[in-house]
Amino acid sequence: MQTGKSRKQRVTNSRHAGHNGAQAKKATTELDVRIGVFRQPAMQTPVLVLNASYEPINICGARRALVLVLKGVARAEEQQGAVLHAQRMNVGMPSVIRLLEYRRIPHQTRALSRKNILLRDRNMCQYCSVILTASELTLDHVIPRSRGGLSTWENLVACCHDCNRRKGNQMLHELTEMKLQREPRPFSLHTSRHIMRMIGSADPSWRRYLYFESGDAAA
Ligand SMILES: [Zn+2]
């Protein structure tokens, strides 16, 4: 986690590299003020991040989004109602930003971890569909480890303790009463977009960036 100070410095340096000392100092003060007003609860509001191609790629906090806009890395495509009154300028709070330079997104963007498996499976037991908190869920190896199953995206699912006990060391085809709700897959951009859609359904300004692919509905 970056401290506020080092992040500010980084912003300042990248923005004002090459300027002379006096100009840089003045600009630092100005940017400090501009970023300073961003320390309020509204700064936590989620902002949708689009690639240069308008493809939704991420969600970040409003504060981070504003920094990206001020650094000239992104521009605000949609704004929230709130306007921040900073020194000598009013800054609209973005609700959607777009990167100015296209960023190649690797097919699989997330590390394999318990947290990400639970996120992919939306905290839902993949056998009985019960939705629980993270601490009430366990991870199940679909093909048990004792039978050669690996810890991979395709072989790990969120599972409640009851189902985990019931399944034990058996293979799924040996258990007629248990089956997977859906085939486990790597956490892809497609998955992330589905989650963005769930979070974004409350924000009308997000919708036109999230619902443009009709093919997505099938998943
Ligand atoms: Zn279950």
Image (cartoon, grey):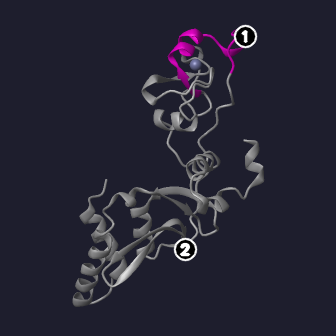
What is the count of numbered marks? 2
Whichever of callouts 2 and 1 sits on the residue coming sooner in the sequence is 2
Residue in view at x 77 percent, y 50 percent:
215
Residue 29 placement (x, y as % from top left)? 24, 79
Identify residue for label 1: 176
Residue in view at x 58 percent, y 46 percent:
195
Amino acid type shown at disc 1 = Thr
Label ID, residue 100: 2
For label 1, being within 8 Å of ligand 1 is answered no
For mark 2, give the secondary structure.
Answer: loop
Tag 2 and tag 1, C-beta contact below 8 Å:
no
Neighbours of disc 2 within 10 Å: few (<14), some (14-19), many (20+): some
Residue 218 placement (x, y as % from top left)? 76, 43
In the rendered image, is residue 184 in sight? yes
Up the image or down, 206 lies above or below 124; here it is below
For mark 1, give the secondary structure.
Answer: loop
Residue 186 vs residue 65, the one in the foreground = 65
- Give ligand 1's quarter of the image: top right
Residue 189 placement (x, y as % from top left)? 61, 50
Where the C terminus falls, by quadrant? top right
What range of the chain is rendered magenta? Answer: 156-179
Quarter of image, res 26: bottom left
